[in-house]
Image (cartoon, grey):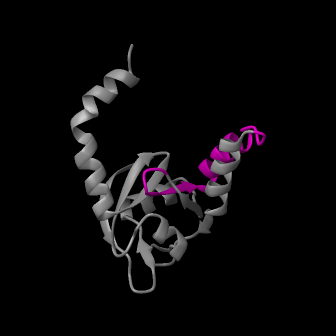
């Protein structure tokens, strides 16, 4: 679905243009709106409405009697915002989400199959530099066949 890395900037009004490739995928899949929320590793997660509903069902099924479930759901759902593209393919990111991900101006938009991640450019570069060497090791542990 969503693949690749793209460098973009937030404009003065806080809008972010999504890569044409991602807009084309959304158009072909009849996706009209997305949900953006706090992600993991200091990035933002962006889901199509259909994928959001699927993830929402998983998260809602976590037992609310467990502290970690309540905390995770509070942070995830309270941060969520519904977004749609304008005619130029831009979305508006709320300030609280930009603050969460330390996004100032330059961002990396990363396709991770069923979701899009939005990173502050420097945070993405740091993450990539710190993890690329262990890619094979991680693959071996996760895909122990």
Residue 88 in sight in this render: no
Q: Nearer the viewer, residue 3 or 107?
A: 107
Write the residue at 28% across / 41% down.
131
Q: Nearer the viewer, residue 27 or 117?
A: 117
Asked if the stretch drawn in magenta spans residue 68, the answer is no
Q: Nearer the viewer, residue 89 or 12?
A: 12
Residue 100 in sight in this render: yes
Residue 123 picture quarter: bottom left
Quadrant the C terminus occupies: top left
Write the residue at 77% across / 42% down.
64
Q: Residue furthest top?
A: 145
Residue 73 at x, y percent in the picture: 67, 50
Asked if the stretch drawn in magenta spans residue 64, the answer is yes
Residue 12 at x, y percent in the picture: 40, 86
Write the residue at 73% across / 44% down.
60
Q: Is 86 placed above or below 62 here?
A: below
Q: Is 59 placed above or below 94 here?
A: above
Residue 82 is left or right of residue 19, and the answer is: right
Write the residue at 40% across / 67% down.
102
Residue 56 is left or right of residue 7, and the answer is: right
Residue 5 at x, y percent in the picture: 31, 55
Q: Is 11 placed above or below 21 here?
A: below
Which stretch is magenta? 40-65
Residue 141 at x, y percent in the picture: 36, 22
């Amino acid at each position: 679905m969503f693949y690749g890395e793209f460098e973009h900037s937030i404009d003065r009004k806080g809008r972010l243009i999504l890569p044409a490739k991602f807009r084309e995928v959304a158009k072909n899949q009849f996706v009209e709106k997305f949900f953006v929320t706090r992600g993991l590793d200091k990035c933002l997660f962006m889901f199509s409405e259909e994928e959001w509903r699927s993830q929402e069902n998983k998260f809602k099924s976590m037992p609310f009697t467990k502290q970690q479930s309540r905390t995770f759901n509070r942070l995830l759902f309270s941060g969520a915002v519904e977004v749609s593209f304008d005619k130029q393919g831009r979305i508006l990111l709320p300030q609280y989400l930009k603050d969460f991900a330390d996004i100032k101006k330059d961002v990396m938009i990363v396709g991770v199959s069923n979701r899009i991640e939005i990173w502050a450019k420097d945070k993405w570069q740091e993450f990539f530099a710190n993890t690329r060497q262990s890619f094979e090791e991680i693959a071996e542990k996760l895909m122990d066949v």
